[in-house]
Image (cartoon, rainbow, N blue to C red):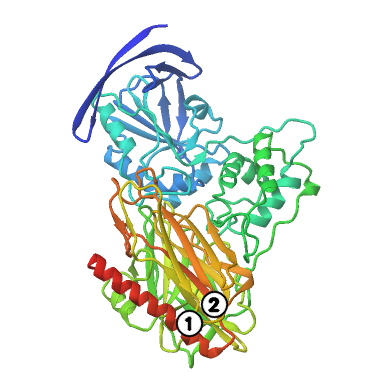
Amino acid sequence: MIPVIVWECSIVKSKVFCLVVCGLLFSSSGLVLAEEGPQKTTEKLSINLTRQDYQGNIHAISPNSRNKVRVFAFITGECPISRSYFPVLNDLYAEWGKNDKQIEFLGVWADVTQSPQEIAEFAKEFSLKFPILLDRDATLGKSFKPTTVPEVFVLDRHGNVEYRGRIDDRYQQLGTRKPEASEHTLKDAVHNVSLGLPVIQPKTKPVGCYYELPPTPKSGEAELTFNRDIAPILNANCVVCHREGEIAPFTLTSYLDAAKRARQIARVVDDKLMPPWKVSQNHGEFEGQRSLTEREIETLKSWAQSDRAEGDAADLPPLPTFASDWVLGKPDLVLEMPEEFEIPAGGPDIFHNFVIPYDIPEDKLVATVQFKPGDPSVVHHSILYLDNSGRARARDKATPEPGYSTFGGPGFPPAGSIGGWSPGKTPRRLPEGLGRMMDKGFDLVMQIHYHPSGKATKDRSKVGIYFVDKPKQEAFAIWASNLELDIPPGEKNYVAKAQYKVPADVTLLSCIPHMHLLGQTMHVTAQFPDGTTQELVDVPQWDFNWQEEYVYADPIKLPKGTVLKVVASYDNSSENPSNPNYPPQQVTFGEETTDEMLYCFFLVTTEKPDDVRIVEGDSLLKEVIRRAAFRMKFGR
């Protein structure tokens, strides 16, 4: 062993930092590792080989190079986080001179099951500009040993791996993403290495999908098989989105689909990220609940840790069938975006509102809606508002593109809503005779949450509306809110409360919790006039990107005087990966990305028609009072 002493300097935000580190050299497989104390680990490429890219060009890969810097990025087209970085990598490739200068940038396709033709088609579809190496035998993967896709490696001209890890800090953990990166880790590392300076942070934790190789099943009967044990779980819970033409970035309709992603599947179900059902698992009273039992989760985890056997073909159940058109038959009314809307390849999520005038002969009750995304790969969810003020039209007219952008709400006090949509949601009619009011002469405002997928595309979504055949009673919204939020910077557990006292007997049909990016938890209970309580919904880990309307399978009677109580918590520390401010700032109530909210909306109905206006008016009056108090306190 040879002791190594290194004088390490790096440029960070125009300042120079230096330190002395020491360590020992030893060899390991295709890379040589030099440990220099707990803060630095340097790896050295020790393989000599040539690799073709998907276009047939040859690239020599060896420890030494004429280039000052070499960058290898392990990517795939099916991991959504990997795809979200394609525009960033395209920009870096162009900024670094397209491999004509002293920086060489090469992608490595991490999915060894895909052919050069499939990779070429994907590169064309997503407009990838940089070379992408084929690694069908996983030699590069076994040499660099990536754990995650995407993961990048920065080498100096002598083959030393000076940096490995994430591209930037937009993703701190699975399921959460900053609106913008505050640290451009890869770009900064390349800059330092090109100047001959070591990197202060040579290793960061990448966030994405596991780097996985296909299974090599052993002979003999397996305890768990895909056909007998795994396919039924995926068919019942996942295939609704993970099939061709739907929003999920890859399919889960075959053995290989699941086998090559087994660890990633096990990870996201164990973390309760998928299926996307954000209320407590002990709730069993909601329609369309998308959650796995603990036994199903353990089955998926155990299969991922095994040889991932396929099993007997006779055990494979048929794939579920889905309606190719309107699930409930032809709608009574179809409303469509007036024109196509362009979604860029990358960048932050987009919340855009499209104003759609409609003409109906009289006020109607809406039993349900079916939303049809124009491009399911980028449409994350939609909420359908009603406007009679003209403000939505005015905002639309003020922008050159179709519609206008907001964050959170639609940018005006809605006159109502006829529902919404999220991936996997099946349209269901409200109980017999009940419906949401759709007034004659109003505008529909279709708010769509777009999630850029890595390729530029266009969307023109539409909604089918089903009216109540024999109207009985209106379903309408009441809510509890708190506009006095004042969250100090650095506060990890800011607790806020809201409540609403029901002024007449109502029946609760559904609820919609709502917060912004600092929100962490929400717990909602009903306190009845006799002093007893009932839990209505519990959200243990709020996710702004997965907002749902939770429809009760058995509607709940709320007698006059029932108090709906809401308790929510917020994290305004730098440890919250969704925090839009870095460093954290003081946050109050508001509509913008950097503001916060506390609302819980309740869809209710009454037995007495006269009580509809009483309850609606009471809820609205209390909101007006709260907003007046907010303006007096905060001056806006």
Between residues 459 and 610, which one lies in front from this camera angle?
610
User: Which residue is at the far bottom?
Assistant: 361
Between residues 515 and 13, which one lies in front from this camera angle?
515
Residue 353 in the figure: left or right of residue 283: left
Disc 1: which residue? 615
Rendering coords of residue 448 (x, y %): 43, 66
- The secondary element bearing badge 1 is classed as helix
State whether residue 27 appears in this view: yes
User: Quadrant where the N terminus lies?
Assistant: top left
Disc 2: which residue? 604
- The secondary element bearing badge 2 is classed as strand
Q: Residue at point 31% right, 38% down?
A: 98
Rendering coords of residue 187 (x, y %): 30, 37
Relative to residue 165, is residue 554 depicted above or below? below
Relative to residue 86, is residue 532 depicted above or below? below
Residue 362 in the figure: left or right of residue 317: left
Quadrant of the image occupied by residue 516: bottom left
Q: Residue at point 61% right, 69% down?
A: 552
Q: Amino acid at mark 1?
A: Val
Q: Are marks 1 and 2 in contact (CB under 8 Å)?
A: yes
